[in-house]
Image: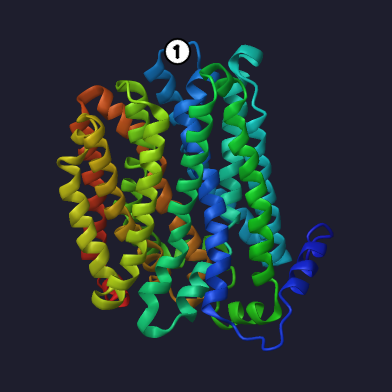
């Protein structure tokens, strides 16, 4: 049963998707997945970039720059903490009212929470309430992201040809570099064309309006797939239906924990080559921020190509091998790469290109690992919970931890933090024999 508000949207989506053959095509699923993930990651990176360039000045202007940035990063993981709560709430909505209603509510909450950030009053207007409001909007984003899990990535992996599972498993991950490229380029444009006063006053708000518009597009792109009869039946036949969260955790706790740690290296690296280097350059160098954002844009393109390459490699040597080899590569990278940030423009470019190459190879197969680790009856809810915990453990606190460690002990400490993520992945892959069997 759908709610009155979502029913017209679902009917419109069904009409748009009407066709004669009623065949389910992996390519069609892939389009919906990429559009949805790009929208979500664009929201993610818009907030992340603003956490470095905007919020320390707008929300914490009474603090020193590095202290203000640390407090800004302290609000950052609230979304990751709230995601499992959102998953539990929206799984209930899914069971009671259907996937289309759940997705509509979640994406409207995500869009609303994001666009409200664009209207955030600063400390100069409302004092400490500015930080409280930002925290509430961030929690709203996290709850919405927990509900935005639509099962399409799992469906894509299960419906793909047997010998091309690695290729199709990497498709959902393309949304991350695409979202980063658009967000970084957009902020680079505003930073480079506006005076600093205008950017801090109003220029930074426009990317959040764009994020809301993208959420609306993504909603229709995903609804046109998930609400059609053939896809509804396929979700049921593949047993991609929501199970109670408590029962799933009780029965699958081991798989959830192992699944959360298996992609830890890629999720830790995720922020170490996106948010952390931007904060380092902004706080400790005199480099032009717009130029560095363009370097991040180039890095995103490199990551995009590396994700595609991961699909080809996974079908040749196995997903577990790709995850294991890249985790070892990330461990080696952690020993010297952070110091490159202190090596001028050439060092920054080398740091970003190498980092995004490793990130693409590892991140490209991380979703496949999550999907393959669960029996059918628990795959939909289990994969959602595992993804939530993997992001929380691997990425949620990464900017705060890396910057705090760097301030206290130097850049070598940021490398040690990244190394811990790589060791977590290697341990998870080595200890779980069943996971290894399923991934090969």
Q: Residue at x 33, y 34 (%)?
A: 277
Q: Residue at x 26, y 72 (%)?
A: 436
What colour scheme does the image use? rainbow
Instruction: Describe the element under mark 1 as helix, strand or loop.
Output: loop
- Residue 273's x, y, as percent? 33, 42
- Residue 404's x, y, as percent? 31, 27
Q: Residue at x 70, y 76 (%)?
A: 228
The image quadrant of residue 150 is bottom right
Instruction: Describe residue 108's horizontal placement relative to residue 65 as left or right.
Output: right
Q: Residue at x 40, y 66 (%)?
A: 170
Instruction: Describe residue 238's horizontal placement relative to residue 165 as left or right.
Output: right
The image quadrant of residue 372 is bottom left
Q: Nearer the viewer, residue 186 or 171?
A: 186
From where the camera sits, is residue 58 visible? yes
What is the quadrant of the C terminus in the image? bottom left
Above or below for 425 versus 29: above
From where the camera sits, is residue 262 visible? no
Q: Nearer the viewer, residue 238 or 30?
A: 30
Q: Which residue position holds label 1?
A: 63
* Residues packed near mark 1 inside 10 Å, few (<14), some (14 to 19) or many (20 plus): few
Q: Nearer the viewer, residue 24 or 429?
A: 24
- Residue 130's x, y, as percent? 61, 21
Q: Residue furthest front?
A: 193
- Residue 172's x, y, as percent? 47, 63
Q: Nearer the viewer, residue 377 or 327?
A: 327
The image quadrant of residue 43 is top right
């Amino acid at each position: 049963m759908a709610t009155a508000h979502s029913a017209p949207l679902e009917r419109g989506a069904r009409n748009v998707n009407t066709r004669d053959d009623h065949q389910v095509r992996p390519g069609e699923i892939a389009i919906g997945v990429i559009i949805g993930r790009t929208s979500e990651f664009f929201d993610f990176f818009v907030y992340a970039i603003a956490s470095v360039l905007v919020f320390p000045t707008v929300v914490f202007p009474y603090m020193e720059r590095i202290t203000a940035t640390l407090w800004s990063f302290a609000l950052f993981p609230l979304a990751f903490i709230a995601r499992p709560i959102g998953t539990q709430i929206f799984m209930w909505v899914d069971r009671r009212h259907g996937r289309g209603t759940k997705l509509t509510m979640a994406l409207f909450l995500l869009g609303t929470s994001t666009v409200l950030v664009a209207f955030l009053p600063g400390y100069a207007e409302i004092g400490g309430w500015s930080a409280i409001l930002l925290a509430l909007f961030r929690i709203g984003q996290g709850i919405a992201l927990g509900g935005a899990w639509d099962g399409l990535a799992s469906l894509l992996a299960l419906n793909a040809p047997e010998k091309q599972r690695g290729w199709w498993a990497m498709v959902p991950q393309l949304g991350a570099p695409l979202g980063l490229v658009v967000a970084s380029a957009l902020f680079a444009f505003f930073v480079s064309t506006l005076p600093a006063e205008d950017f801090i006053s109003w220029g930074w708000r426009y990317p959040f309006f764009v994020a809301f518009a993208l959420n609306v597009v993504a909603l229709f792109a995903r609804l046109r797939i998930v609400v059609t009869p053939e896809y509804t039946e396929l979700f049921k036949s593949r047993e991609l239906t929501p199970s109670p969260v408590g029962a799933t955790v009780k029965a699958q706790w081991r798989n959830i924990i192992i699944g959360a740690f298996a992609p830890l290296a890629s999720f830790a690296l995720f922020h170490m080559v996106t948010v952390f280097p931007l904060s380092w350059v902004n706080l400790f160098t005199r480099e032009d921020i717009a130029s560095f954002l363009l370097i991040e844009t180039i890095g995103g393109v490199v990551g995009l190509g590396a994700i595609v390459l991961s699909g080809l490699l996974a079908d040749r040597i196995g997903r577990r091998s790709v995850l294991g080899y890249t985790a070892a590569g990330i461990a080696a990278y952690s020993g010297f790469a952070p110091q490159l940030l202190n090596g001028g423009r050439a060092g920054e470019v080398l740091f970003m290109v190498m980092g995004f190459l490793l990130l693409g190879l590892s991140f490209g197969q991380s979703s496949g690992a999550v999907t393959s680790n669960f029996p059918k009856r628990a795959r939909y809810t289990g994969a959602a919970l595992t993804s939530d915990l993997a992001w929380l453990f691997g990425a949620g606190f990464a900017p705060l931890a890396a910057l705090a460690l760097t301030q206290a002990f130097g850049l070598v400490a940021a490398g040690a933090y990244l190394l811990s993520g790589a060791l977590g992945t290697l341990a998870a892959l080595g200890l779980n024999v069943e996971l290894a069997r399923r991934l090969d």
